């Protein structure tokens, strides 16, 4: 007998349970189409994505805080710089105001040495030649000194003014004389122009008279030339008519049979263009021979065409017979092929009936398909 109440091995039982749980997990992974297709742990990936997104958001918040702090610092720096610049400007303004009020140049001890108008404010060393301050050793009076320069310049200016006025008067007078001379010249030119116009008119009238006389003379010459041409044309016409009449009634065109032979009893060809009766009969005989030969050639061609036409008709009939034979053979072949297809279709139907009614009588149920993929092994 077998002992059935043996104590249970805890380790073995734990190992069995562990294997069972792993098998269940394995089955869940195998039969999970999505997990099997992806091939990774989607939950872990989702968790990683969330952590990464959280870190990105945290980093973004940190950067935004730094940016705001940087902007505030820059703004404070700008305010401090503006305040410092304002204080510097105010200090410089106050310094300039103090210097302008209490540190003027004239308040300095050395102003008498640095005054630019110092020499202008001093008394001149020499006023005139009778100055009592000038002594023998003053060195202010010299021989040849021009003390009347201002008066002399004034006189020179007055003289220059008078000369200038005199030049103006002379120039005005000269311009007046030139104007009168030009006016007289214009009048003279107008008179000459009128005289030249009169001469031109007289010359034009002479030219017109000469042209009229020349035209009349040319017309007379042209009339005489036309008369001479008409007379010459009339004479030429009469000569041509006479020549035509002489030619028409000459022995050459009339073929006068009286004077046909020369001294050697030969026909003069420029008087007789005809032929003798024997020559005409010979030509007619040759023409009849040529006509008969042409008729023979036409008859031969007609016979050849008839023969060729009969040959073509025979070939066409033979081709029609051959085509009919080919159609008949094709019809018989199609009939045999149709019978063969019917036999094959009958055999196929019998085989399908055998397979469906005899060989495969029992159809598989759902339990048959459920036995597959039930384990992972």
Image (cartoon, rainbow, N blue to C red):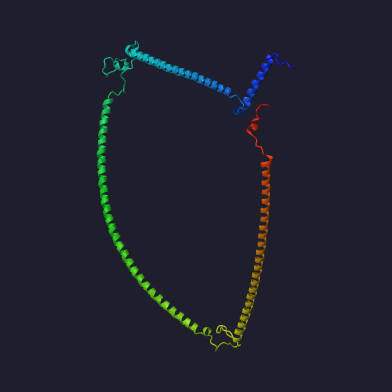
Q: Position of residue 258 (x, y in %)?
A: 55, 89
Q: Nearer the viewer, residue 360 or 139?
A: 360
Q: Is residue 195 above or below residue 66?
A: below
Q: Nearer the viewer, residue 33 or 166?
A: 33
Q: On the image, which quarter does residue 160 sit in?
A: top left
Q: On the image, which quarter does residue 31 sit in?
A: top right
Quadrant into which the N terminus falls: top right
Left or right of residue 80: residue 369: right
Q: On the image, which quarter does residue 281 sit in?
A: bottom right
Which residue appears at 47% of the width and 83% of the height? 245
Q: Position of residue 190 (x, y in %)?
A: 27, 53
Hey, which residue is sitting farthest top in the picture? 109
Q: Nearer the viewer, residue 162 or 178?
A: 178
Left or right of residue 239: residue 42: right
Which residue appears at 66% of the width and 60% of the height? 328
Hey, which residue is sitting farthest bottom in the picture? 258
Q: Nearer the viewer, residue 48 or 224?
A: 48
Quadrant into which the C terminus falls: top right
Left or right of residue 174: residue 82: right
Q: Is residue 344 above or below residue 151?
A: below
Q: Position of residue 222 (x, y in %)?
A: 37, 72
């Amino acid at each position: 007998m077998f002992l059935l109440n043996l104590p249970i091995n805890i380790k073995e039982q734990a190992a069995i349970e562990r294997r069972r749980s792993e098998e269940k997990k394995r089955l869940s992974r195998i039969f999970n189409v999505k997990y099997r297709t992806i091939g990774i742990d989607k939950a872990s990936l989702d968790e990683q994505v969330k952590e990464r997104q959280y870190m990105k958001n945290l980093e973004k918040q940190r950067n935004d805080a730094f940016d705001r702090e940087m902007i505030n610092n820059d703004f404070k720096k700008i305010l401090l710089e503006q305040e410092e610049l304002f204080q510097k400007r105010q200090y410089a303004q106050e310094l300039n105001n103090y210097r302008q009020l209490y540190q003027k140049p004239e308040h300095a001890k050395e102003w008498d040495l640095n005054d630019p108008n110092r020499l202008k404010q001093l008394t001149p060393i020499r006023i005139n030649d009778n100055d009592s301050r000038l002594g023998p050793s003053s060195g202010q009076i010299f021989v040849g000194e021009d003390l009347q320069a201002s008066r002399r310049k004034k006189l020179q200016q007055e003289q220059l003014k008078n000369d200038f006025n005199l030049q103006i008067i002379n120039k005005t007078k000269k311009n007046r004389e030139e104007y009168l001379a030009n006016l007289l010249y214009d009048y003279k030119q107008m008179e000459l122009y009128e005289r030249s116009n009169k001469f031109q008119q007289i010359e034009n009238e002479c030219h017109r008279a000469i042209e009229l006389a020349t035209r009349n003379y040319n017309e007379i010459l042209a009339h005489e030339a036309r008369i001479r041409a008409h007379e010459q044309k009339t004479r030429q016409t009469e000569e041509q008519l006479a020549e035509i009449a002489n030619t028409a009634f000459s022995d050459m065109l009339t073929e006068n049979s009286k004077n046909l032979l020369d001294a050697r009893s030969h026909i003069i060809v420029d008087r007789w263009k005809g032929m003798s009766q024997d020559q005409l009969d010979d030509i007619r005989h040759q023409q009849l021979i040529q006509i008969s030969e042409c008729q023979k050639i036409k008859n031969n061609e007609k016979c050849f065409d008839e023969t060729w036409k009969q040959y073509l008709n025979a070939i066409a009939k033979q081709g029609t017979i051959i085509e009919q034979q080919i159609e008949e053979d094709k019809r018989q072949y199609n009939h045999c092929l149709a019978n063969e297809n019917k036999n094959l279709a009958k055999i196929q139907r019998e085989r399908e009936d055998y397979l469906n009614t005899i060989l495969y009588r029992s159809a598989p149920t759902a339990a048959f398909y459920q036995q597959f993929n039930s384990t992972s092994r």
